[in-house]
Image (cartoon, rainbow, N blue to C red):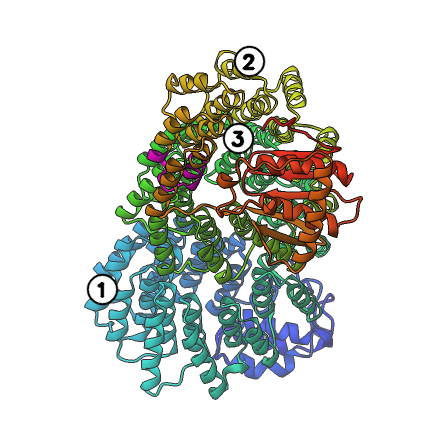
Amino acid sequence: MPSSSSSLFLSFCRLSAPRFPPKLAWRPEGWVHRHALLFKFSVGPGSRLFASGYAHSAACEVSGDLPNGEPEGSSSDGIPWRDGLALLGWMESRGIRADCNTYAGLLESCLNAGSLVDAKRIHGRVLKLGLIEEDVICLRLLDVYSVSGDMCDAVRLFDDVRNRSGASWNSIIVGFLLRKQSQRALHFFFRMLRECREPDPNALASLLRASSECNVSWHLVQQIHAKIIRYGFSSNPVVGNPLVDLYSKNGYVDLASLVFEELGSRDSVTWVAMLSGLSQNGLGEEAFLLYDHMHRLGIIPTPYVFSSVLSACTKCELLNQGKQLHAQAFKWGLFSETFVSNALISLYSRYSDMESAGKVFGGMLCHDGVTYNSLISAHAQHGNSDCAIHFFRDMQLSGFKPDSVTIAGLLSACASIGDIQNGMQLHSYALKSGISSDIIIEGSLLDLYVKCAKIETAHKFFHMTSKDNVVLWNVMLVAYGQMGNLEESFKLFHKMLVARVEPNQYTYPSVLRTCTTVGAVELGEQVHALILKTGYEHNIYVSSVLIDMYSKCGRHETARDILKRMTEDDVVSWTAMISGYAQHEFYLEALRLFEEMQLRGIQTDNIGLSSAISACAGIQAIQQGLQIHAQAVLLGYSKDLSIGNALINLYARCGRLRDAYSAFNTMETRDEISWNGLISGFSQNGFFEEALKLFAHMNNEGLKANLFTFGSAISAAANITDVKQGKQIHARMIKTGYDSEVEAGNVLITLYSKCGSIEDAKMMFSLMPERNEVSWNAMITGYSQHGDGQEALRLFDLMNQEGLKPNHVTFVAVLSACSHVGLVNEGINYFESMNTLHGIIPRPEHYACAVDILGRAGQLDRARRFIEEMPIDPDAMLWRTLLSACRVHKNIEIGEFAAEHLLQLEPHESATYVLLSNIYAVARKWDCRDRMRQMMKDRGVKKEPGRSWIEVENSLHAFFVGDRLHPLANDIYKFLEHLNDKATESGYKQDKEGFLHDTEQEQKDPTVYIHSEKLAVTFGLISLSPEIPIRVIKNLRVCNDCHTWMKFVSRIMDRPIVVRDSYRFHHFKHGSCSCSDYW
């Protein structure tokens, strides 16, 4: 029998239209809404009212007293709950009593709408009607109070009810768990057990799910599990599934596996929970093995299971297993499930296989927002900004809305390639979509403008954002750091502190790196003090940056102290310390620290290895360098760019150019440092032509040379006096804008000086907008080498007047200038002033210059005393200088004295034997001369043969003594005979005294005119047009006879001749030499 309220309401539905109250009218369009209202709020499930009153109730529509439309509160199925309350009021005004199902429905609507106030009104009505003991009403009220957070009224209601159902206990317990009051939840759980209420599986499952969502104490979970075991629910999947999920999410995979194994039956939820748990805990292989076991059991995986295993493969980098799953998904037709395809896209994207990801995308029946977000993020992460933007636009056309993470990824992609245009369009989209204020979007936008060098825009945007986000402050600090703008960086840092934004472990490193970049270690110390105050000194990241700053700024003791105080071994900190040592040429300390790091078991990285290799290069420790090279190969760093560059430098410095070239060729990628290292390596080892070929090859590869590259190439050209190629390189420097750099001007001065174009060097010096000590040194040295000692000394005085301090190099040039022009007293005064006026302690090369000054002037006894009174031990260079002076002035006694010391220091140097042999020959001591030559043979010493070079039509021609191998040898010798005749007619007399002991000639042939420099000059005269000067290079000192001969030839042919020998430049013009016969 229907209840009285149902009967009355049924009677109401059968009333004819005219008998309705005045405000009730017929509305056919509101029927569906009203039917749902009646069913929801007046009729309980299964009531006969629906069957008997359905058709007739369609005849009327309540209006006026019952508000129409959708007020602010609605139930979950769209039914306005306030209409239900109005209907209830209308019923009560006519004496119709609602039953418990009606009130339960109204309470459920209050629950969905979150209306605690109306729920309490209904609570009051059911109390008056005595319906509070009805389980369905009690349960709904408990749900409303629990969800609303009113646990006091929930407990009061619960305690007032005498007959509590299991669902009621479950509701109150879950309510406390939702409020994260795990102890109260545990109290009611055990109270339920004390009251002899046996928990049912559904209640326990709800309790476990709530525990998972609310992160309750682990102690509570263990006690719930114990009760599950006690009541025999261990094999029940209703309880087991949430328990597996709970254990897996909290990292207790072993416990989850035990529960999984104990389950009597497993459904898809069970497998998904276990597979997801393994995946989330980094056990991808175990997840795949479990899936394989499931497959062998004949269980066809559901799409959710399949998706879980694919996620495991993605997270744990199991590409091959993922590909197997892809094949199975195709076999079982699982591509119809969008989330399975999404998982495959994530898998391939993780491995940069965007082609396969694109194929999966193209084969999908339908796409969703996750599909597009995954693909866009993947392309953005891999720098494919164009593809990312394409899919972004396709996503918009498909009606899907990208989330903040996707937009942030797109912005990052644009920032990485400097695509400011698309980046600004994305900014516009973020503004229109209302997500521009999202923290991740703000950070990405700021990063975009910073990386695209839009610093002003970034600054303006930063001031428009919320100032409480420390990430944004950090981005701006990094931006100023990259610019090296210390002032703005510290201003911003100060504003940050004033705004009470607390710096984090990324803030301090940003400021410290700026200090490192500009070398402001004092300001860095102030930041360090603040770090100590705020307690970040033990943060590994902060400590590593502090070590990097102090070590790069030369404060190695402070850096080492921080390293010692670190509580954890961090490879970045150790490598920063090693790198700092190597950069400041503390090579032994760097290698000791590298060894100590390995002994402590710290796995080095590419930075540590490259720094250690650089340290080996600094001290030319080739064996240790080879060991570190082998270690780099074993650790998988053989293709690393920084290590490859360090190896090129190592092998080049140690003279192993073949190994350097091999290291260069094995590099997959090369940068300017790679090319510079190899070019400078060849140049420094005397392979100048090879260095220039490499420079040309670098240009052909389309790589841009930097200032160091140009410097190495010009140095190579200067050393072979290739002024033509030097000028070509100079032109390239002008084209690229490097010619205005001070360093560029310096190397160009050296180039033109070494190539004999002292006027070009002078012009370069005068055109330089600014000069440093190196500029002055280069010009003074140039004048000195070209025999213009007076001009060199004048420049030295000007240098002092401009306030520039001379250094060791300056005084080598000044003393050499004094030596070349015979300024003995001035030279010795300059030498003495080094220490007394300039505080420079003389080095061996300065003592050698002083001995040369005295020796060239013939003051050999004074030179000998000078050596004997030196505060340092004389080296081979000093004794060789004295011996050369003895040869010029034919002093056998002091010559023998110098040769004796020289042979002790360099027993295999041929120059000593040749010089002393020549002294004996001049004195006609033939026995002594023959004894010296026999000593050379017995010791296996070979004299370097004399060679001369001249460039004609872009080709370098080399000549040896008596050379007849040149294709034009007959023409050369014929014209040389003509020149000798003309010179003899003009007063030239051949120096026959020294032909048997000449520094170049070994054979007993009186034809002195076949010296290599004569052949080179003669070839130049018959090959070069008259307006081109003759430029010859010789590897040994020009002999007296050739020097005299060239003076005559310059006058006879009216051609300037420039000869650069191992000592200096000789400019022959109109019958005289720039050295004034003093060399």
Q: Position of residue 341 (x, y in %)?
A: 53, 76
Kindly identify which residue carries mark 3.
519
Q: Callout 2, which amino acid?
A: Asn
Residue 463 in sight in this render:
no
Bounds of the magenta segment: 903-916
Kindly identify which residue carries mark 1.
227
On residue 825, which mark appears? 2
Q: Position of residue 214 (x, y in %)?
A: 39, 55
**214 left or right of 89 in image:** left
Tell me the quarter of the picture where residue 567 sits. Answer: top left
Specify which label sits upstream in the sequence, 1 or 3: 1
Q: Residues within 10 Å of mark 3 (few under 14, many from 20)?
A: some
Specify which label sits upstream in the sequence, 1 or 2: 1
Picture layout, residue 230 above or below residue 433: below
- Residue at x 46%, y 23% (from the top left corner): 847
**Marks 1 and 3 in Cβ contact (< 8 Å):** no
Does the stretch in magenta take in 908? Answer: yes
Q: CA distance from mark 1 to mark 2?
A: 108 Å
Specify which label sits upstream in the sequence, 2 or 3: 3
**Nearer to us in this view, 473 or 177:** 473
- Residue at x 62%, y 76% (from the top left corner): 13
**515 left or right of 456 in image:** left
Q: Nearer the viewer, mark 1 or mark 3?
A: 3
Q: CA distance from mark 1 to mark 3?
A: 66 Å
Disc 2 on helix, strand or loop? helix
**Nearer to us in this view, 303 or 189:** 303
Q: Quadrant of the C terminus?
A: top right
Q: Residues within 10 Å of mark 2 (few under 14, many from 20)?
A: few
**652 left or right of 40 in image:** left
